[in-house]
Amino acid sequence: MNEDNELEFFGSYFPDEILETLIYYDMPRSFTINSSKGDLLLAHWLDTIKDDDIYVVVLVNEQIINDLKNYKITVYDCLNREPLWVVKQNHDGTLTRTSRHTLEEVDRLYPNSLPKKGIYLYG
């Protein structure tokens, strides 16, 4: 999937149509959304740099979200799956860039932004 297709994949649903907010601190920090094709996605805020909010986004399903909410998997483990995108969104709501990465790459690009290993959603 090239970048134009990935921007289309996220479409206007990011993050205007949040299905469920899992972490809220001044704004939704971790939440579920649907892609333009109806796929369930988990988005987790990493940082704000200049005019962009930066999220890591992964494909999930209801079971994974239930496991996350019921302390069966950690936030880090939930995010450690492919495909994984880094999504940048301007403060006016415009998606400015998407790119695919591994979680290890994200950790190198945005040090100290990912949830620590071993931390559960509400812990």
Image (tube, rainbow, N blue to C red):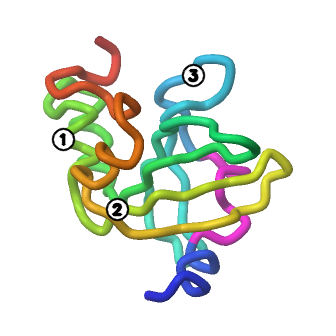
Give the percent coordinates (x, y) of residue 62. Answer: 33, 51
Which labelled disc corresponds to residue 46? Answer: none
Residue at the (22%, 21%) spot, across then down: 119
**Residue 118 is covered by the magenta coloring:** no
Identify the element where label 2 is drawn.
strand
Q: Judge from the rendering whether residue 72 lies leftward or rightward of residue 40; answer left or right.
A: left
Residue at the (28%, 47%) spot, across then down: 79
Spot the residue most to the top.
123
Kind of residue at badge 3: Tyr
Q: Which residue is mark 3?
A: 24
The span picked out in magenta is: 10-18
Please tell me how crowded label 3 is: few (under 14), some (14-19), or many (20+) other residues with Cα within 10 Å: few
Q: Which residue is mark 1?
A: 77
Q: Which residue is mark 2?
A: 84
Quarter in which the C terminus is drawn: top left
Spot the residue most to the right.
92
Kind of residue at badge 1: Asp
Q: Judge from the rendering whether residue 89 lies leftward or rightward of residue 40; answer left or right.
A: right
- Tell which of 122 and 62 is nearer to you: 122
Identify the element where label 1 is drawn.
helix
Kind of residue at badge 2: Leu
Labels 2, 3: front one: 2
- Tell which of 1 and 48 is nearer to you: 48
